[in-house]
Image (cartoon, rainbow, N blue to C red):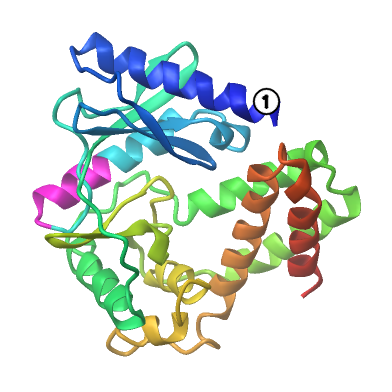
Amino acid sequence: MRWATERVARALAAARSVAGAYGLRTDEARVLHDGANVVIDLSPAPVVARVATLTSLLRPDPARPFGREVELARALAAAGAAVVPPSDLLPPRPHRRDGTVVSFWTRVETRPVAPSPREAGEALLRLHEVLAELPVPPDAIPLDTPLDDLTAFVTRGREWGVPADRLARLDERLAGLRPRLAGAVRQLHGDPHPGNLLATPDGWLWGDLEDSCTGPLAWDLACLRSTRRLDGRAAVDAFPGAPSDEQLAPWLELRRLHAGVWGVVIDGDRTEYATEARARLDAVLAD
């Protein structure tokens, strides 16, 4: 756990250093979350920082997904979507400091309330009403976020103690999935589970767009359907003409693989959880 503690300390120092360069006071800063990224409340400045830490293990240049996230959040906020906007107290882009990538977001007042299945589904429906109006970048590669992450893990998975035969199995599963993931392409949230839906005095706001990509709507629906935080099937049913689980099957499988891989990466330096994370990935691959 020492490495994890040092990682968080470096993330905190990088975020405070960048914020301080723009005249923001951060002497009451506190860590909110340590996962693929470290999330920091930079109080008393009304800013939350996201610092790329473990995410760089699968994504060689975290500035790319961080930049995509900032741009999409800006476009959605400008179009009136219910999303957490980037902070306007610093330039709205990824910032680099001492080899670390940081983005900065407007701090919003949150309430300790979880959405019901219908609330989560309707919130995603409203988000997609705006996403459907945004142009798809001409150079966009559909579903590049989950597919590239999985491809990278096939190459590097031995670093987390995953046996070669499991990685070969993952590669086979991925090759079999690719032709089944076709559909009309649009902008996507990329990771719309209820943990990324914040209860605020002004209603529900979506955050954490780092996994945003383009692709079929089915990917976002599969992400919501797969959640264990609430009844995902009931949440998806809030969409008019919601697809069945059978229709979502390829995207549900992609979600299981993607979540399984990131579980291994995130828990890789937590000895008490690493074995369990590898076992969960084994179970997905054996399914």
| Res 15 quadrant in image | top left
* Residue picked out by circle 1: 3
Start-end of magenta stretch: 71-80
Instruction: Decide if residue 177 is on the left or right side of residue 169.
Output: left
Instruction: Decide if residue 174 is on the left or right side of residue 133.
Output: right
Q: Residue at x 42, y 38 (%)?
A: 65
On the image, the x and y values in percent for residue 17 come to 35, 12
Rendered position, 126 above or below 63? below
Q: Label 1's element?
A: helix
On the image, the x and y values in percent for residue 48 come to 29, 35
Q: Residue at x 62, y 71 (%)?
A: 253
Local crowd size for mark 1, using a 10 Å CA cut-off: few (<14), some (14–19), many (≥20) = few
Q: Quadrant of the N terminus?
A: top right
| Res 239 quadrant in image | bottom left
**Residue 79 inside the magenta-drawn segment:** yes
Frontmost residue, 268 versus 56: 268
Query: For the stretch drawn in magenta, what is the main secondary structure?
Result: helix
Q: Quadrant of the C terminus?
A: bottom right
Rendered position, 219 above or below 55? below
Dot 1 amino acid type: Trp
On the image, the x and y values in percent for residue 13 come to 43, 16
